[in-house]
Image (cartoon, rainbow, N blue to C red):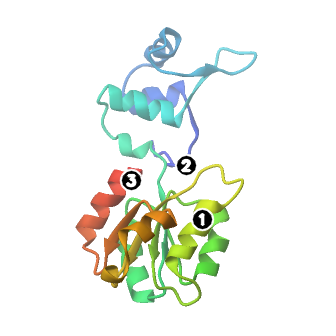
Amino acid sequence: MSLRPERAHYTTGEIARLCQVTKRTVITWIDSGRLKGYRLPGGAHRRVAAADLAAFMKRHKIPDLERFLPRRRILVVDDDPDFAELLQRALEDRYDVSTAATALEAATRLPEFRPDLVLLDVRLPDVSGLEVCRHFRGRRGASRRPAIVVMSAYGRELSPAAIRRSGADAFMAKPVRLADLRKRIRAMVG
């Protein structure tokens, strides 16, 4: 059975096939409270939210947990198209990645793409990356704010205090080692 990561809920039959148990076992898990689920109105059918199923599988060390977790979204904001493409290719196996070359393009992508993490170059052609960071942090009505990693080849010109004041969560100097970047991303968004 092939499941899409964007699925929000699973039936008892789907869970049974995935966990290689009977449907009755899944119903028992739900009814006993071991697996958080709910009944549909007017019937005996049960559903389990993807996040609750993922937590249950992790707790009980059931393999293939990655298939159930929604893919995290990363927005790469960098005016160097080669670098942005390199990051996109390096990360798209585990994450949904979108790119923007300017601050304006990033600002328009933010509400529709809703990234979990923004990889943000400090030197953009239209506005400083630190200004972009402050703008992202100051957005009113945003239900959730993405984590922000500021990147720059000119790290010595930036003070750690200025980076913190901008609202960035982390700083990485360019050239970025992909192994280090992946580690940082996993630590920040999973």
Callout 2 amino acid: Glu
With 115 as the anchor, is 178 left or right in this view?
left
- Whether residue 136 can be seen here: yes
Residue 16 screen position, x and y as percent: 44, 26
Tell me the CA gap for discs 3 and 1. 17 Å
**Upstream in sequence: badge 1 or badge 2:** 2
Residue 43 screen position, x and y as percent: 71, 15
* Residue 6 tag number: 2
Q: Comparing marks 2 and 3, which lies closer to the viewer?
A: 3
* Residue 136 tag number: 1
* Rendered view: 54 above or below 189: above
Q: Element type at marker 1?
A: helix
Q: Element type at marker 3?
A: helix
Tell me the CA gap for discs 2 and 3. 20 Å
Q: Which residue is mark 3?
A: 188
- Number of other residues with Cα within 10 Å of mark 2, as a class: few under 14, some 14 to 19, many 20 or more: few
Tell me the CA gap for discs 1 and 2. 25 Å
Point 29% across, 30% down: residue:
61
| Residue 20 image-quadrant placement | top left
With 73 as the anchor, is 47 left or right in this view?
right
Quick one: which residue is furthest to the top in this view?
Answer: 32
Quick one: which residue is furthest to the right in this view?
Answer: 42
Callout 3 amino acid: Met
Point 31% across, 59% down: residue:
184
With 48 as the anchor, is 178 left or right in this view?
left
**Upstream in sequence: badge 3 or badge 1:** 1
**Upstream in sequence: badge 2 or badge 3:** 2
* Residue 84 tag number: none
